[in-house]
Image (tube, rainbow, N blue to C red):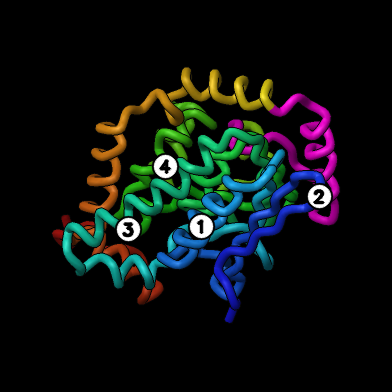
Amino acid sequence: MSASPVLWSLNARGVATVTLNRPEVNNAYDGALIAGVLAAIEDLSTKPVRVVVLNGNGKHFQAGADLKWINGVRPKSLEENEAASRATFEAVQRLNTLPVPTVALVQGGCFGGGTGVIAACDIVIAADNALFSITEVRWGLTAAIIIPQLCDAISVRQVRRYALTGERFGAEDARRIGLVHEVVPSADLESAGAKVVEQLLGNAPDAMAETKKLAMESSFGGMGVDDEAYKRLVHLHSAKRQTAEAAEGLASFAEKRAGRWGSGAA
């Protein structure tokens, strides 16, 4: 088992690397990983950071929610479920609004919440073996808290396809719809990231921060969604987890079978 679910480091040039570190479960997120992301961002906020690079240990970047954890949260109180959704939202939104450039390096699987994480990053480079899916509907859940970031990244039209079908799509399709900016051979992922970091380090920090802020102010997934709207998304995200439909979806995952959506689950 991994020692810590999230690792971070900062070099002398101000380049921070934040690494998702649950490779034994393909970096699927649970409460500890969410808390680790929030703690890393909080720690880095006190440091002279110029760029943040986000990556994942192991074969896969991020496999979405740990459904065993989700199934453990589901029967708890409404308040506990909302707290779990709120923490997840805060981790993505803190990443989304960091005043420094963020670069995500994606290999292997990037599913569910992982697509929201990369949609919240400024620059995304994918290995040619990367595979993507907005999977929540397969398990009777919704992607409520990452829908704004996804709409920003790939447009409402593409969300209406990929978040409804839950289908998997490859790196070239992810580039075509705008979820990633560049696709490179797997062996070149780190060097491609380093090249982008060099470009960013050559730019004026305050000018980049102001440019990012102005872009965010006009975006649906950034500052354009007010606190009340996000409270509603958090509520919808957590409430859906506690429905009979979600119970059936999570059971289908655990039992490795198709969901029985015609059996009255709702």
Q: How far apart in space, not on screen, are marks 2 and 1 (Cα)? A: 21 Å
- Is there CB contact under 8 Å for labels 4 and 1? no
Residue position for label 4? 146
**Mark positioned earlier in the residue sequence (2 or 3):** 2
> Of the numbered discs in the image, which one, if any, rests on residue 39?
1
Residue position for label 2? 12
- Is there CB contact under 8 Å for labels 4 and 2? no
Q: Disc 3 marks which amino acid?
A: Ala
Q: How far apart in space, not on screen, are marks 3 and 4 (Cα)? A: 14 Å
**Mark positioned earlier in the residue sequence (1 or 3):** 1
Q: Disc 1 marks which amino acid?
A: Ala
**Mark positioned earlier in the residue sequence (2 or 1):** 2
Q: Residues within 10 Å of mark 4 (few under 14, many from 20)?
A: many
Residue 162 image position (x, y, % from top left): 46, 40
Work out whether residue 119 can be spotted.
yes
Callout 2: helix, strand or loop? loop
Q: Is residue 41 above or below residue 58?
A: above
